Image (cartoon, rainbow, N blue to C red):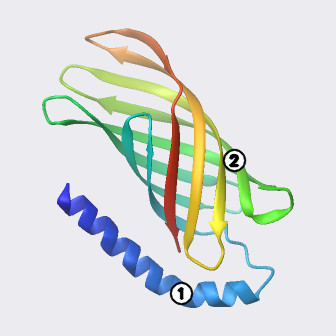
Amino acid sequence: MKFIVSLFLLVSLSTFIQSVKAQESSVLNPEYDVWKKNGVGIAYGGGSLWLNYKHYFSKFALEGNFGYYRGGTLGFIPRFQINVMKHYTCFDLKDIQFYWGLGAHYQIAEKPYYKLGINALIGFEFNIIKAPLSIFTDAGVEPSYRGKSDSGFKWSFPARLGLRFRW
């Protein structure tokens, strides 16, 4: 865990240093599009901590998440998630975006337990133009199948709040 946190801080610091010059020029350029970038961040919600990476394409964004819940014999239960999202400008303000998305998730706990499902989410992202940061919040619905022990179809309704470093 210390290695992951150290690696995250190192990437965040190097990202911040590299983006300072780009951010200075972008503040002066009103045509600058802050959504065609990459971002690495952390989020918390639903009892889990998430590390995420997001890449903004011209018409959509792709986000990958690695999260974990407390519990299990290892002390944590890992979870992987990928989402494709569509962003829209809110109230004609460039730094606030509304988004919706679809994706899938896979979670493995103690053998032979697993969880496989789909995601549907909506959220808001606020870009801080003068800093390489964005704050986001989203909520969704996740129908999923739990295999082996506690088998069956389950619904969950997660929400999260996060901070992302952009470059």
- Which residue is labeled 2 in the image? 99
Left or right of 67: which side holds 124? right
Give the mark nearer the N terminus: 2 vs 1.
1
Q: Residue at x 13, y 30 (%)?
A: 73
Using the rendered view, name the quadrant where residue 111 is placed: top left
**Within 10 angstroms of label 1, few (less than 14), some, or many (20 or more) residues?**
some
x, y percentage for residue 70? 26, 35
For the N terminus, the quadrant is bottom left
x, y percentage for residue 44? 43, 45
Using the rendered view, name the quadrant where residue 112 is placed: top left
The CA span between labels 2 and 1 is 26 Å
Q: Secondary structure at mark 2?
A: strand
Q: Are marks 2 and 1 in contact (CB under 8 Å)?
A: no
Question: Of the numbered discs in the image, which one, if any, rests on residue 20?
Answer: 1
Q: Secondary structure at mark 1?
A: helix
Residue extending furthest right?
A: 92
Query: For the residue marked with disc 1, what is the amino acid?
Result: Val
x, y percentage for residue 24? 63, 89
Q: Residue at x 61, y 36 (%)?
A: 121
Q: Residue at x 64, y 55 (%)?
A: 125
Number of numbered tags placed on the structure image: 2
Q: 132 or 167, which lies in front?
A: 132
Q: Is residue 28 above or below residue 121?
A: below
x, y percentage for residue 156? 49, 22
Residue extending furthest left?
A: 73
Using the rendered view, name the quadrant where residue 93 is placed: bottom right
Q: 79 or 75, which lies in front?
A: 75
Q: Is residue 12 above or below residue 151?
A: below
**Within 10 angstroms of label 2, few (less than 14), some, or many (20 or more) residues?**
some
Q: Is residue 102 above or below residue 136?
A: above
Left or right of 78: which side holds 112? left
Query: For the residue marked with disc 2, what is the amino acid?
Result: Tyr
